[in-house]
């Protein structure tokens, strides 16, 4: 048993090939480089997505503010138009009354 184990160990030692180890190291380094590139791209993509989300929120807030401003302006114009219309109606009513009863009786 001891001799068989020794012979097995010698065959393993004899089969050791430094070039295979170097090749595996090169492949590992290459894969690590690619993983780092992918991680860097993922970080850049995540930053861009975060910027886009922040911009979208900012635009939405600005849009709501603009909508409120437009509604307030529209309400103001609507009130002004209604006031002018009421004035014109009152004048028309006075003109009708004056034209049907010129003496004011």
Image: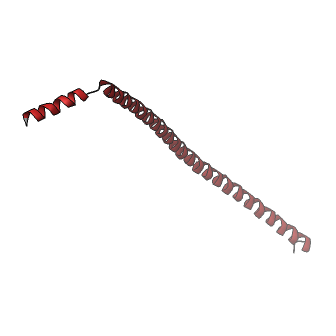
In the rendered image, which quarter is residue 25 located in?
top left
Tag count in the figure? Answer: 0
In the rendered image, which quarter is residue 7 located in?
top left
The quarter of the rendered structure image containing the C terminus is bottom right
Image coordinates for residue 73, horizontal then vertical, percent = 67, 52
Nearer the observer, 29 or 4: 4
Does 70 sit above or below residue 93?
Answer: above
Nearer the observer, 75 or 18: 18
Nearer the observer, 103 or 25: 25
**Identity of the residue furthest to the left in this view:** 2
Image coordinates for residue 57, horizontal then vertical, percent = 52, 46
- Residue at image position (84%, 66%) is 92
Question: Is 76 situated left or right of 13 in this image?
Answer: right
The quarter of the rendered structure image containing the N terminus is top left
Question: Is 40 situated left or right of 85 in this image?
Answer: left
Image coordinates for residue 28, horizontal then vertical, percent = 36, 31
Residue 101 visible: no
- Residue at image position (51%, 44%) is 53
- Residue at image position (62%, 52%) is 67
Question: Is 31 situated left or right of 75 in this image?
Answer: left
Question: Is 91 situated left or right of 36 in this image?
Answer: right
Nearer the observer, 53 or 68: 53
Image coordinates for residue 59, horizontal then vertical, percent = 57, 45
């Amino acid at each position: 048993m001891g001799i068989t184990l020794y012979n097995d160990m010698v065959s393993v030692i004899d089969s050791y090939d430094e070039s295979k180890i170097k090749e595996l190291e090169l492949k590992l380094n290459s894969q690590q480089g690619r993983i780092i590139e992918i991680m860097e791209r993922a970080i850049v993509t995540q930053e861009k997505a975060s910027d886009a989300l922040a911009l979208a929120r900012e635009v939405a807030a600005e849009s709501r503010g603009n909508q409120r401003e437009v509604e307030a302006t529209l309400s103001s114009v609507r009130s002004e138009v209604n006031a002018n219309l009421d004035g014109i109606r009152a004048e028309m009513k006075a003109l009708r009354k004056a034209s049907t009863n010129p003496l004011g009786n």
